[in-house]
Image (cartoon, rainbow, N blue to C red):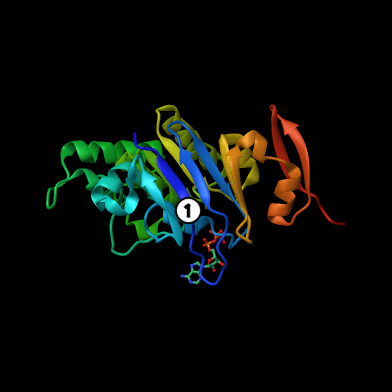
Amino acid sequence: MNPLQARDLVIDIPGRDDGEALNFIIQPGQIWGVLGPNGAGKTTLLHTLAGLREPRAGEVCLGEHRLMELKRKRISQQLGLVFQERQDGFPATVLETALIGRHPWLSPWQMETGNDEEIARRSLEQLDVAHLSDRMVNTLSGGERQRVAIATVLAQAPDTWLLDEPTNHLDLHHQVSVLQLLTEQAGAGNSVFMCLHDLNLAARWCDHLLLLYPNGEVCWGPAERMLAPVALERLYGQELLTVEVDGAPVFVPRKVW
Ligand SMILES: Nc1ncnc2c1ncn2[C@@H]1O[C@H](COP(=O)(O)OP(=O)(O)OP(=O)(O)O)[C@@H](O)[C@H]1O
């Protein structure tokens, strides 16, 4: 696989000074979590890594190639993106939506094959939404729609998964199922890079963390090194209590009486 890399990358947040430059490689098998308060720039970073936004400086590379030099089709065979906001531009059923994940693998004007449909149906089953295959996506609940979006990227079969708050709208069981699925993807040699608001899910499932501060300060590295309570309290402007469960830290906001 061609790992996704940020090389001297400065994301472009309108009206804000340049932040620190980012230099990292998302290696096969790694699961990265991006943490930061509202407005810190997590979505902007994700969209810049996906090639949907121009960086202010530096570049994003897939292997040795600059993303901007690659054809969109080649990028979409390697990078999958789960958006924070759903983009249901036209009416479609759940199965038709999952089949969109197969488009990077089709020639222009080629129809999906039986094999594509089988892959799409299997992806819907894995996300526990196969029973909704014939429903219009705009009639689904928030959590069902989120799982269809993840199933669509699963059908796409990218090497690198970029996800913007993938556990949004999901109940606890489905949050765990999705994180387990992403762990399996990493176990198969793919890589995962996701924005998360839940510090404890990040602490439990991510092996690397990137902390994005609203002033443009940034730090990244192995999760155990990044999970320093002092750094996290400063990140969120929130006092935390730390306990250990199953050998991993669990962070709880300190209640002010
Ligand atoms: N097109 C735009 N024009 C002006 N400001 C923008 C634009 N897009 C994003 N911003 C601003 O850039 C900042 C970073 O936004 P971004 O969506 O990346 O934050 P985030 O960390 O993902 O936030 P959240 O946790 O709320 O999802 C915000 O202050 C946002 O208002």
**Residue 141 appearing in the image:** no
Q: Quadrant of the N terminus?
A: top left
What amino acid is labelled 1 in the image? Leu
Q: Residue at left 73%, top 57%? A: 237
- Does any atom of ligand 1 lie closer than 8 Å to the CB of label 1? no
Q: Nearer the viewer, residue 98 or 77?
A: 77
Q: Which residue is mark 1?
A: 9
Residue 197 screen position, x and y as percent: 60, 51
Does residue 236 appear to the left or right of 155 in the view shown?
right
Q: Mark 1: which secondary structure? A: strand
**Residue 117 appearing in the image:** yes
Q: Residue at left 43%, top 44%? A: 5
Residue 213 screen position, x and y as percent: 63, 56
Residue 58 screen position, x and y as percent: 44, 54
Q: Nearer the viewer, residue 88 or 38?
A: 38
Q: Nearer the viewer, residue 162 or 98?
A: 162
Q: Quadrant of the C terminus?
A: bottom right
* Res 123 quadrant in image: top left
Name above or below for residue 153 compared with residue 83. above
Residue 240 screen position, x and y as percent: 77, 47
Q: Residue at left 24%, top 36%? A: 118
- Single out the residue that lies furthest toward the right: 257
Does residue 69 appear to the left or right of 166 in the view shown?
left
Q: Residue at left 13%, top 51%? A: 108
What is the number of callouts on the image?
1
* Res 16 quadrant in image: bottom right
Does residue 38 appear to the left or right of 189 in the view shown?
right
User: Label 1 neighbourhood size at 10 Å, few (<14), some (14-19), many (20+)?
Assistant: many
- Single out the residue that lies furthest toward the bottom: 15
